[in-house]
């Protein structure tokens, strides 16, 4: 069985992330969406909220599981018995960062491969940082998010008011 890890902060999970996840479901037996704690990045949403959003977004995908993690990615891969990491590439600017991370992970765990997938053209511009910027300006980003995630965010915003 080919189990792969799709790691990220997912702050929040977007249609771009879902594009990669859905592509991966056609290539691999099991996808583990690994939500990184990443407190050093200062995420907008808590780790628990990001896990809940990812679970809601992936609920209908039978071969997708969502897990939180706070250790090194290669250690998480070993813990989950996976030797494949999936990463998304939207633009050339992503490539340089992803290449560095792929090499760093390979230096720590040569048995783990990194596979890069590109989102479809309509999702190539979507990033969590774009979504967060829109949210900070109280504008709608429903078109960039899975409906379940948008509902969670809208409910959370209303609770703050």
Image (cartoon, grey):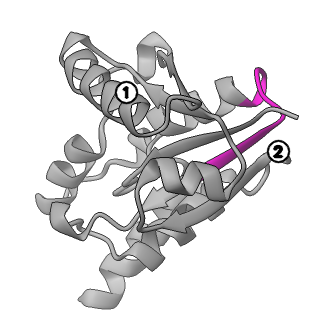
The quarter of the picture where the N terminus appears is top right
Lower position in the chain sequence, tag 1 or tag 2:
2
What separation in Å lies between label 1 and label 2 (alpha carbons)?
25 Å
Q: Is residue 3 above or below residue 148?
A: above
Q: Nearer the viewer, mark 1 or mark 2?
A: 1
The structure residue drawn at horizontal position 54% and vertical position 30%, both measured from the top left corner, is: 86
Which label number is shown at residue 15? Answer: none
The structure residue drawn at horizontal position 34% and vertical position 18%, both measured from the top left corner, is: 90
- Residue 107 location (% of width, % of height): 37, 31
Q: Circle 1: is it few (<14), some (14-19), or many (20+) Cα within 10 Å?
A: some
SS for dot 2: loop
Q: In this view of the protein, can residue 13 be seen by the observer?
A: no
Kindly identify which residue carries mark 1. Answer: 102
Q: Is residue 161 left or right of 150 when viewed as pictured? A: left
Q: Is residue 154 left or right of 149 when viewed as pictured? A: left
The quarter of the picture where the C terminus appears is bottom left
Q: Is residue 3 above or below residue 89?
A: below
| Rendered image quadrant of residue 104 | top left
- Residue 24 location (% of width, % of height): 68, 27
Report the residue that reaches farthest toward the left.
137
Identify which residue, 75 or 95, lies in the foreground: 75
- Residue 141 location (% of width, % of height): 33, 48
- Is residue 29 shown in magenta? yes
- Is residue 147 shown in magenta? no
- Residue 69 location (% of width, % of height): 49, 66
Q: Is residue 46 above or below residue 33?
A: below
User: The magenta stretch spans which residues?
Assistant: 25-33
Kindly identify which residue carries mark 2. Answer: 63
């Amino acid at each position: 069985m080919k189990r792969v890890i799709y790691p990220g902060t997912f702050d929040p999970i977007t249609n771009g992330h879902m594009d990669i996840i859905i592509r991966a479901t056609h290539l691999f037996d099991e996808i583990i969406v690994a939500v990184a704690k990443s407190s050093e990045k200062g995420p907008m949403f808590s780790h628990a909220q990001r896990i809940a959003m990812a679970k809601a977004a992936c609920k209908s995908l039978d071969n997708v599981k969502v897990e939180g993690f706070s250790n090194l990615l290669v250690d998480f891969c070993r813990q989950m018995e996976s030797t494949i990491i999936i990463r998304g590439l939207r633009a050339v600017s992503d490539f340089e960062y992803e290449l560095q991370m792929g090499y760093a992970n390979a230096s720590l765990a040569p048995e783990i491969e990194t596979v890069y997938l590109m989102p479809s053209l309509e999702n190539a511009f979507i990033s969590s940082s774009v979504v967060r910027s829109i949210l900070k300006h109280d504008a709608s980003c429903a078109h960039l998010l899975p409906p379940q995630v948008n509902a969670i965010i809208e409910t959370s915003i209303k609770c703050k008011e």
